[in-house]
Amino acid sequence: MLAAFLVLAPPLYFLGPFVVLMLLGGVRTPKEWFALAIASGGILLAVSGSAQLGPALLRGSGIAVAIAFGVVSVRARGPALPRAALAVGLATAGLAIWCGWQGITWPEIERTFTAMLVETYRAVPSLTSDPATQRDLQGFIDPMVVAAPDIARVMPGLLAVQALGGTALAGVWHHRIASQPIGLAPAPFRAFRFNDHVIWGAILTLALVLLPLPANGHAAAMNALVVWTGLYAFRGLAVLAALLTRVSLALRVAAVIFAVLLNPIALGVCLSIGLADTWVDIRERLRPSPPEGVSP
């Protein structure tokens, strides 16, 4: 049950904000009603199930992000991503206050997420009935089981990155489906960028990680660094997406296969490109120069 919920929880970060946007903008056409019904059904499926701490935290985080996104979207009519960032920040603060009120400590949260990850990994070999394949899968997941405590330590940061991506995606689909969408139409993903000066926030966070902080303070800094890593990795991926529009379909497919097979390397490449794009506007530099005598 815990393993299944860990898989079902991330869609909440898309479905919840999508339903909120649809309701705020008004549901008028059959297509809008159908999309709202499908998304609502997905939410009901995701929030049902175990009442243990881990699922409760995941479920609560999805609901909190959706509610916070609705609050900041009532009057704000700008792009979805800044509203998503504010909503994730508010939801994180709200959950932290709730955990403190309930007496839930950080070590307890770590243990809960570790147990959920271990159960998820150990369920993988049972997906097949072939003994040889099961042995191969067991060998593949054994290192992941060992690493589960380290992953659990940064799980809030990973969930925050998922929430940002899911909420931004909800804004995209809201504009595709709604007859009168809220806010500005999202730019294509290949144009994704943010203010270059926020790099100082990432640098400050890295400095905090390196300082001898108390355990809870170090955990908070590590999770914040994970969020920064996700943002700059997404920026690097957007740069690569812009570059891949210039190449053939075969090379695009090869790039996707490479990213899937060598995920850690692909993440490092995206992160490096995203950081470099802060100082060197790669997409602008690679834009073709206008013909001589023509103004840009």
Image (cartoon, helix red, strand yellow):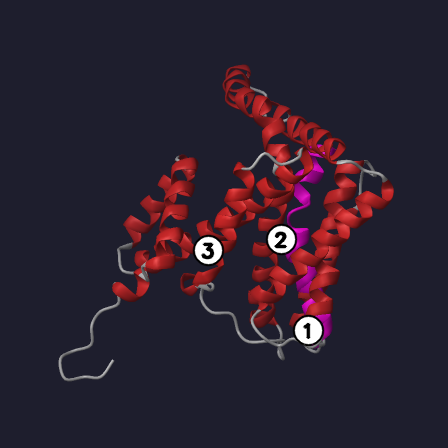
Decide if residue 177 is on the left or right side of residue 40: left
Query: Which residue is under mark 2?
Result: 163
Question: Residue 91: x, y in percent?
Answer: 72, 55
Magenta part of the protein: which range? 1-25
Number of marks in picture = 3
**Quick one: SS at disc 1?**
helix
Give the CA distance from mark 3 to mark 2: 21 Å
- The image shows residue 217, relative to residue 277, as above or below, that is above
Q: Amino acid at mark 3?
A: Ile
Q: Residue at x 49, y 47 (%)?
A: 229
Q: Residues within 10 Å of mark 1 (few under 14, many from 20)?
A: few
Question: Residue 262: x, y in percent?
Answer: 39, 35
Q: Is residue 186 visible?
A: yes
Q: Amino acid at mark 2?
A: Ala
Specify the label residue 193 is tagged with: none
Query: Which residue is under mark 1?
Result: 30
Mark sitting earlier along the chain (1/3)? 1
Mark sitting earlier along the chain (1/2)? 1
Query: Which residue is under mark 3?
Result: 199
